[in-house]
Image (cartoon, rainbow, N blue to C red):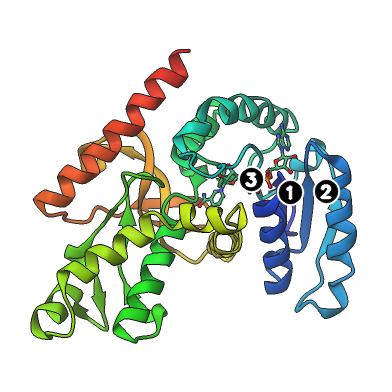
Amino acid sequence: MANNINRVVVVGTGFVGSSYAFALLNQGVTEELVLIDLNKEKSEGDAMDLNHGLPFAPAPTKIWFGDYRDCKDADIVVLTAGANQKPGETRLDLVDKNVKIFKSIVNEVMKSGFDGIFLVATNPVDILTYATWKFSGLPKERVIGSGTILDTARFRYVLGEYFQVDTRNVHAYIIGEHGDTELPVWSHADIGGRSILEIVEENEEYSLDDLERLFINVRDAAYHIIQRKGATYYGIAMGLVRLTKAILQNENSILTVSAYLDGEYGQNDIYIGVPAVVNRNGIREVLELKLNEEEKEKFAHSVKVLKEVMNHTFQA
Ligand SMILES: NC(=O)c1ccc[n+]([C@@H]2O[C@H](COP(=O)([O-])OP(=O)(O)OC[C@H]3O[C@@H](n4cnc5c(N)ncnc54)[C@H](O)[C@@H]3O)[C@@H](O)[C@H]2O)c1
């Protein structure tokens, strides 16, 4: 945050990181974009390739393949490095490998004198966001995980299809772990100000069974995509761009991110997906939805599952 020029650094230019860089360039979000990867050839190649798109971009962007010293003047460092899920693997299975990788990456970033905002997407994202917060020593507001931003987008998409309404007019959240224990907040899901549960009750063409099936598809979407093409990246890349814009343009946008809970939802000392207000300072506040009993139980279960893995990981 040393000058008025916005700089975003991406660490890990694999499927997710390079798709994010491409989406960022296409939307003209930042003036400077630095790419870092263990595989230097890959990030150098990506920088060359992206630069060749500049004549077609909506705004000038300076893009280069860099190293950790470039993080010093960065506003945002986006972490997309590490192992991804193989077919059949859960996100939690990746924890040991990726926590080790994160320890070295976050140390390198902090050694540069970085004093901006971390955005984390690597899985299991809730635990790696917690690890980034611990390893960096930055205030909790300035460490943000992508959380359930993608799951919420998938949810809004399938609900838009089901009710034949523009997905952008669907307001509905997935909260909890970005993973198998996430949950839909049906009690606060609405379209154009009308509760989705009410719409279903009043129209026999819709049913609660269908809603449950839609949610299961959302929860398991990554498995379905990974089975077909090996990885998921476009959706999360656009979600990360959305978050980047909310930060750089000081939007006060409400997005479902992995945020640190300090009493909200009756939980402490955990990063998990919840709606939060995001602006130039990071997370301004966590929004505490009034959950019904079933939702409360499911959320508490999600927290419990994450904490069990965290206890094991951070004690080891
Ligand atoms: N949060 C989400 O919603 C979401 C969605 C999709 C994928 N992901 C996660 O994003 C992560 C990346 O997925 P991907 O498909 O891009 O994987 P990938 O294998 O294509 O890319 C990972 C990159 O990280 C680099 N890397 C590994 N160790 C590094 C280190 N120490 N320093 C710098 N770079 C290093 C690798 O060289 C590689 O280029 C995975 O953990 C995946 O599960 C998250």
The type of residue carrying mark 3 is Thr
Ligand 1: does it lie within 8 Å of the C-beta at label 1?
A: yes
Q: CA distance from mark 1 to mark 2?
A: 6 Å
Q: Identify the residue under disc 2.
A: 43
Query: Where does label 1 land, which residue?
Result: 13
**Residue 242's quadrant in the figure?**
bottom right
Q: Earlier in the sequence, mark 3 or mark 1?
A: 1
Q: Which residue lies at the image location 46% right of the left edge and 43% below the top edge?
A: 141
Q: Position of residue 148 (x, y in %)?
A: 41, 53
Residue closest to the eye, 198 or 1: 198
Q: Residue at x 28, y 40 (%)?
A: 302
Q: Name the residue located 23 percent from the left edge and 63 percent from the top edge.
A: 212
Q: Is residue 171 left or right of residue 245?
A: left
Res. 133 visible in picture: no
134, above or below 301, in the image: above
Query: Picture coordinates of residue 268 (x, y %)?
Result: 29, 32
Name the residue located 51 percent from the left edge and 35 percent from the top edge.
Answer: 128
Q: Tell me whether the residue at label 2 lies in contact with that at label 3, contact meaning CB atoms closer than 8 angstroms.
A: no
**Could you say whether the residue bearing mark 2 is in a helix, strand or loop?**
helix
Determine whether label 3 and label 1 are within 8 Å by CB.
Answer: yes
The Cα atoms of the two marked residues, 3 and 1, are separated by 7 Å
Q: Earlier in the sequence, mark 2 or mark 3?
A: 2
Mark 2 near ligand 1 (CB under 8 Å)?
yes
**Disc 3 CB within 8 Å of nearest ligand 1 atom:** yes
SS assignment at label 1: loop
Residue 80 marker:
3
In contact (CB < 8 Å): disc 1 and disc 2: yes
- Callout 2 amino acid: Ser
Dot 1 or dot 2, earlier in sequence: 1
